[in-house]
Amino acid sequence: MSTERGTVEYIIFRNEENGYTVMQFLCEDGTPIVAVGCLPQITEGEVLELTGDVVFQPKRGEQFVFESVNFIAPAGKEEIARFLSSGLFPLIGPVTAKKIVDFLGEKTLSVLDETPDILKRIKGIGEKKGAKIAAGYRLHKSIRDNMFFLQKYGISLSKAFKICEFYGEDVKSQIEKNPYSLIEDIEGIGFITADKIAETIGIDRQSEFRIIAGIRYILGTNSSSQGNTCLGKQELIRLSGELLQDVPYDSISEIIPEMLKRREVISYNPEPEDEEKELIALPLFFNTEKAIAKKLMKLKEEAETLSIDVFPKIKEYEDAQNIYLHQTQKEAISKAINEGVMVITGGPGTGKTTIIKCIIQINESIGKETVLAAPTGRASKRLEEATGKASSTIHRLLGVDMNSGSLKFIHGENNPLTADMVILDEVSMADIFIFNALIKAMKKGGRLVIVGDKDQLPSVAAGNILGDIISTQVLPVIYLTEIYRQEAGSLIVENAHRINSGNMPLLDNKSKDFYFLRTNTQEEIVMQIKDLITSRLPSYFSLDWKDMQVLSPTKKGFAGVSNLNKELQTLLNRNKGQLILDEATFKVGDRVMQTVNNYDIEWVRHEGNFVEDGKGIFNGEIGFISNIVRGEIEVLFEDGKKAIYGPGNHSDIMLAYAVSVHKSQGCEFPIVILALCGSSFLMNRNLLYTAVTRARNAVVIVGSENDLAKMVKNVRIISRKTLLKYFLLEEADAPNMNSASKIKEILKKRMNENIFPYDGNSLPDEEI
């Protein structure tokens, strides 16, 4: 990092929405440079001190990319007059500026800082105009002061803009009052940043609201990193103590009852006789899972009893398609038509798509409207291609409405969907919030068919919907175990089921779609992957690298996602125009993935003469960078949406030449290349199974046979703590539920009967 002091000669480009500025800057030694970065209000002639680095852009030459700025007050009457008349302040032109400086002299700015109302005493300005000028000056000073204030705490300019926009002129007072409010109010600011500010301000590290913020932060981040919607009380105290460091565990323990009284957190104990089993949740998670349980049971009860004999219609479908359905498949179709809610679960090749197509045909033959949905765009596209019927994401089905400034859906309890049946595929990817929004929007008497693979990893986001529903058995569940789709010479489906059964996959490399390359080190893994992508696979399958997806269990390590992305970007993308950020370097042509749900980003889609626009890009969507101009990244997504990412949204996307297995859920790729590396917790059977089932045409596993064997044998998993299963049992057995401990008895009985051998657990996502 270096520092340059000088004057803004002229502004080349400026985006007023996010402050991104390109300017000609004259250094004190007379050297002109092009400076690029985010700035609040700025005008030509201002004196600045910039801190940053020189970056070479092939098309634009050297640019000084600054990360922080200090505004230097102009000195001398001429400079002050030019500054006041620069256009930053309403009603001040050259003539008025001269009057002000002539009246106040070289102390003009300090006088205006302290007593701007003095302007009304200047001849020719008067009280009314003076009041407006003073108000404009105060606003300008407030913005600058707030930016300075935030920069002192190491907050980037882009985040500082978000903070100023959220709090307005109250930034300083709000943060000095409670800096921990930033954690929940401003996306991208965590406890560590807020805690540093609090320490600098002088807030007592034993203060109650610091401890409360730490507890809430642990509950919130544990949901995003491990999918938990609650935590055991003792675990919460321990994790909070590790975060807060010098706060005694007793202090944390004593504050939790006060938080419970104020409903800042909610307690639930499935075994009241054992205090050690007490669970603590944030109200948002508790209430959402409670609402899901109530609505699911309501859908089950409200469904109009059709009692349709669907078996003759199934026979018609079999004859028309020249197929024969297994009795279990027929039962699934019958329950879908006649039950309010039902679950179909099975692995690859077990006939889920065939069943869905038959359900659609029969349901529509009796005059009922059917809609298909999935949590992500990729999963929705796969469902549409497989069934031949239009499908959409849950967000698109419900209709995103951001007109109020916050996320709302067009369809909900007061404006339900018209569909008589909703078929939701890949439900294991859905978090509790979007699932709750969907079922709330279902019409009275509507039917919900939930489809998923119980043996895949659960959603990266909060909750374990599929696992919890299946574990309780309060709703009909059909397990598909017979394999029907198995092409000659194909091993993807067979090996997936072998892995899921705890058996080693066949590794003779004689099949047409399943290959294993033996390596001993992570360096060898990366070398083999690079050779596969550039040479061996393109020549064998006649496919481009864009049809291949590299997966890794972990973000870290030489064969982890982060390094693989750097290696593959260098190998596959020779474009020179680039944007260097803290986390990555982006170039035109890069494959990228959206990593969070962002409901504010605007997009446009062109299909022939038809133009569609909207808002919202969602976690897991993949696209390619089509342009980079003045710090803005244009991304063309696979479904045709085109979106612009400004400096404030750069962190929403990541390079996606390689992605984690978790982030690949719900996706299907022509060819999957899996790098075997990671910690023992991540090298797990469920993760291996999930990776293999992402491949449509071929899968190539690169690593050691020993590591592969360990993954197949490793069923060690970390329990995902959720409340939905308890709430479902309460709703189902409410009339007879005298004690919450009965829930435990029901779950134990069903586990012992092996009704549900999968316990709904998952691994933590090491990426987050």
Image (cartoon, rainbow, N blue to C red):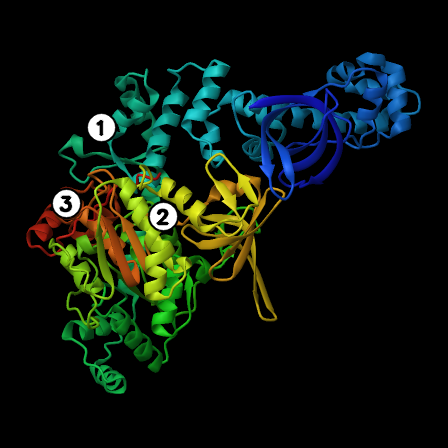
Can you identify the residue that label 1 sits on? Answer: 234
Can you identify the residue that label 3 sits on? Answer: 706
In depth, the one of 34 and 235 nearer the eye is 34
In x, y percent, where is residue 756? 14, 55
126 vs 163, left or right, is right
Residue 396, placed above or below residue 713: below
For the N terminus, the image quarter is top right
In whole angstroms, how far apart are the C-alphas of marks 1 and 2? Answer: 34 Å
Amino acid type, mark 3: Asn
- Residue 37 visible in the displayed image: no
Amino acid type, mark 1: Gln
In x, y percent, where is residue 447? 32, 67
Pick out the residue farthest to the left: 752
Q: Earlier in the sequence, mark 1 or mark 2?
A: 1
Can you identify the residue that label 2 sits on? Answer: 659
In x, y percent, where is residue 265? 33, 33
**Label 3: element kind:** helix
Please rate how many residues cluster around mark 2, counting C-alpha atoms within 10 Å: few if below 14, some from 14 to 19, many from 20.
many
Amino acid type, mark 2: Val
